[in-house]
Image (cartoon, rainbow, N blue to C red):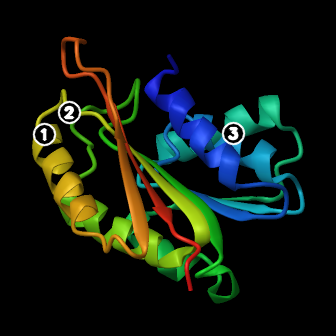
């Protein structure tokens, strides 16, 4: 079976290709940013967001090492809740994928965590910005303080999405201990 992160990548890979505009809503250490940069190529654009300078620096370093020409990647030192104000208007409603990894920066300050007050508006903006056939992936980490509450808020948000416009999937390993992460994926349907 695929890990949670690999499964998120597989879902995105099925719906996104060269030339697309995509978003890494939580840049972290740059794993998803690098994946997206390779997927969309230089014809596409990646917007990566994080509130911590440490994350932006780590992402920039990872790109420099593994994707030397990353001129198609835009790094934004701000909350993912500000997605709409940093993605050009021409790209809005045309985004192929938005990826979230909620929780805290691995190796960083465990007190700096994502919260429902920023995450839910960011998810709403992300869902509205998707093109038809676009995808939103949300990896939920629940082992930190507030993680369960944020996951519950995200699940409630995803469950209320209109069935005629979106399909929502949950992917998790049920027998793992110590708060294993799980994935919620949202696809915007191609129906007119």
Badge 2 element: loop
Badge 1 element: helix
Residue at image mark 1? 148
Give the quadrant of residue 90.
Answer: bottom right
Among numbered discs 3 and 2, the one appearing first in the sequence: 3
Give the quadrant of residue 115.
Answer: bottom left
> In screen coordinates, is 146 left or right of 188?
left
Name the residue located 67 percent from the left edge and 54 percent from the top edge. Answer: 15
Give the quadrant of residue 47.
Answer: bottom right
Front residue of 186/82: it is 186
Distance from the alpha carbon under mark 3 to that under mark 2: 24 Å
Among numbered discs 1 and 2, the one appearing first in the sequence: 2
Distance from the alpha carbon under mark 3 to that under mark 1: 27 Å
Picture layout, residue 107 above or below residue 9: above
Percent position of residue 186, x then y: 43, 57
Badge 3 element: helix
Distance from the alpha carbon under mark 1 to that under mark 2: 5 Å
> In screen coordinates, is 54 left or right of 32?
left
Q: How many numbered discs?
A: 3
Picture layout, residue 73 above or below residue 165: above
Percent position of residue 81, x then y: 37, 69
Q: Are marks 1 and 2 in contact (CB under 8 Å)?
A: yes
Residue at image mark 3? 35
Q: Are marks 3 and 2 in contact (CB under 8 Å)?
A: no
Picture layout, residue 97 above or below residue 39: below
> In screen coordinates, is 52 left or right of 40?
left
Among numbered discs 3 and 1, the one appearing first in the sequence: 3
Residue at image mark 2? 142
Percent position of residue 100, x then y: 44, 49
Name the residue located 26 percent from the left edge and 65 percent from the top edge. Answer: 120
């Amino acid at each position: 079976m695929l890990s949670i992160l690999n499964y998120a990548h597989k879902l995105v890979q099925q719906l996104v290709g060269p030339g697309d505009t995509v978003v890494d809503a939580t840049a972290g250490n740059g794993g998803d940013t690098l994946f997206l940069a390779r997927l969309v190529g230089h014809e596409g654009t990646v917007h990566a967001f994080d509130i911590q300078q440490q994350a932006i620096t780590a992402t920039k370093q990872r790109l420099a090492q593994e994707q030397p020409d990353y001129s198609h990647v835009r790094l934004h030192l701000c909350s993912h809740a500000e997605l709409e104000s940093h993605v050009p208007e021409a790209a809005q409603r045309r985004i192929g994928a938005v990826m979230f990894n909620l929780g805290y920066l691995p190796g960083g300050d465990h007190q700096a965590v994502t919260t429902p007050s920023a995450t839910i508006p960011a998810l709403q903006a992300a869902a509205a910005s998707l093109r038809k056939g676009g995808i939103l992936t949300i990896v939920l980490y629940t082992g930190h303080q507030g993680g369960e509450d944020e996951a519950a808020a995200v699940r409630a948000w995803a469950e209320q999405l209109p069935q005629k416009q979106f399909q929502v999937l949950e992917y998790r390993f049920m027998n793992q201990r110590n708060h294993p992460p799980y994935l919620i994926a949202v696809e915007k349907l191609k129906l007119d």
